[in-house]
Amino acid sequence: MTLRCDCGNLEITAPIPVQVTVCNCGICRRYAALWAYYSPGEVTLQVGEAGVALWQRGDREIEFVRCARCGIALNARLAEPALAGVPVR
């Protein structure tokens, strides 16, 4: 599967995950994020000229990497409907 931010600056190519995770923390609920986890060798990341921006939650225990141009963070929701039938944890 290939995930792209809205402007195409970021692109991740990875296999369809075995399962995905819905986090119930405040920020993940607001992002409506659906997370897939991989080993580094399973994923190809391409970053365009605009680069990335980092955002840390107030307690600095979690960091989100998002497109510096459009602000979109890549998560498995961008792969729907390819994830139909993948178990959600």
Image (spheres, helix red, strand yellow):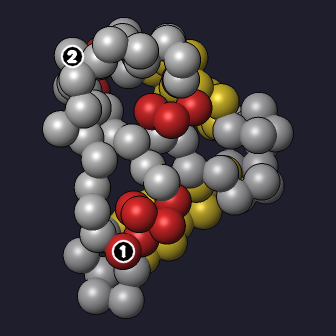
Of residues 35 and 69, the one nearer the viewer is 35
Q: How many discs mark residues in the rendered view?
A: 2
- Tell me what residue is drawn at x 27 percent, y 55 percent: 23
- Tell me what residue is drawn at x 53 percent, y 41 percent: 74
Cα–Cα span, label 1 and label 2: 25 Å
- Tell me what residue is drawn at x 60 percent, y 62 percent: 53
Position in image of residue 13 (x %, y %): 50, 17
Position in image of residue 16 (x %, y %): 36, 12
Q: In this view, does 62 lie above or below 65?
A: below
Residue type (three-letter) at the residue carrying disc 1: Gly
Asked if labels 2 and 1 touch by Cβ distance under 8 angstroms, the answer is: no
Residue type (three-letter) at the residue carrying disc 2: Val
Camera sees residue 68:
yes
Q: Is residue 13 above or below residue 52?
A: above
- Tell me what residue is drawn at x 39 percent, y 62 percent: 28
Q: Is residue 65 above or below residue 57?
A: above
In the picture, the quarter occupied by the C terminus is top left
Label 2 CA crowd tier, 10 Å (few <14, some 14–19, many 20+): few
**Label 1 or label 2, whichever comes before in sequence order:** 2
Q: What element carries label 1?
A: helix
Of residues 83 and 1, the one nearer the viewer is 83
Q: What element carries label 2?
A: loop
Tell me: 66 left or right of 86. Answer: right
Residue carrying label 1: 26
Position in image of residue 4 (x %, y %): 65, 30
Label 1 CA crowd tier, 10 Å (few <14, some 14–19, many 20+): few
Residue 18 is labelled as 2
Q: In which quarter of the image is residue 29?
A: bottom left
Camera sees residue 41:
no
Q: In which quarter of the image is residue 83?
A: top left
